[in-house]
Amino acid sequence: MKHYLIFIILLINIPLFPKGGSIVGNIFDREGNPLSGTNITISGTTLGAESNEKGFYYIEPVKKGLYEVKAQFIGYKSENRIVVVEENKRVRVNFFLDSDEMILPETIIIGKKDTLYPWFNKFAFKKESLNKKKARPIFLFKRKKPITEEAEKNIGFFENIYYNIWKIFN
């Protein structure tokens, strides 16, 4: 009796929940190379997929109807196709995307040396003292005079702080 009941429930559920159709295909660039990671979406739905390393994608289940399928990949122009999906049928849609080159404005990066406190990174250690537990720094302040008087006033203050921090951790 249990087996008949399970069989009847399964037969009733099959027509109530049709599988729908599917959309499959491949994504290539114009040279025929597969584009992995391409986003394929069906407009007006929440359905979509991402192509694998061979450019293949698979979207299922898709209800019967007319849909716009869109393929998007960074650096390539998006492409749209209109497809008709039928119940329990597989529709193949292949995309060949064109490169989307953009000419960007020139960017110039200029680096400047710190002129306010040029002495900050100028100290070293004697090679022999590095093996000892309490190595003392040798300050290398053979520099030109700072650009501003304010920098000249602050040199001793920051040197002292930097040395005291070094003493705490060593």
Image (cartoon, rainbow, N blue to C red):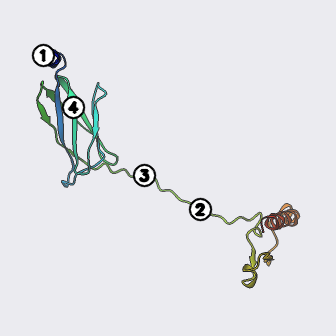
The residue at which mark 1 appears reads as 4
Q: Residue type at mark 2?
A: Ile
Q: Nearer the viewer, residue 71 or 143?
A: 71
In terms of sequence position, does the residue under pointer 4 or pointer 1 come before the other? 1
Report the side of 160 relative to 94 (left or right): right
In terms of sequence position, does the residue under pointer 2 or pointer 4 come before the other? 4
Report the side of 106 relative to 123 (left or right): left
In terms of sequence position, does the residue under pointer 1 or pointer 3 come before the other? 1
In terms of sequence position, does the residue under pointer 3 or pointer 4 come before the other? 4
The residue at which mark 2 appears reads as 110
Q: CA distance from mark 2 to mark 1?
A: 81 Å
The residue at which mark 4 appears reads as 60
Residue 58 in the image: above or below residue 55: above
Nearer the camera: disc 2 or disc 1? 1
Q: Quadrant of residue 92?
A: top left
Q: CA distance from mark 3 to mark 2?
A: 19 Å
Secondary structure at badge 3 equals: loop
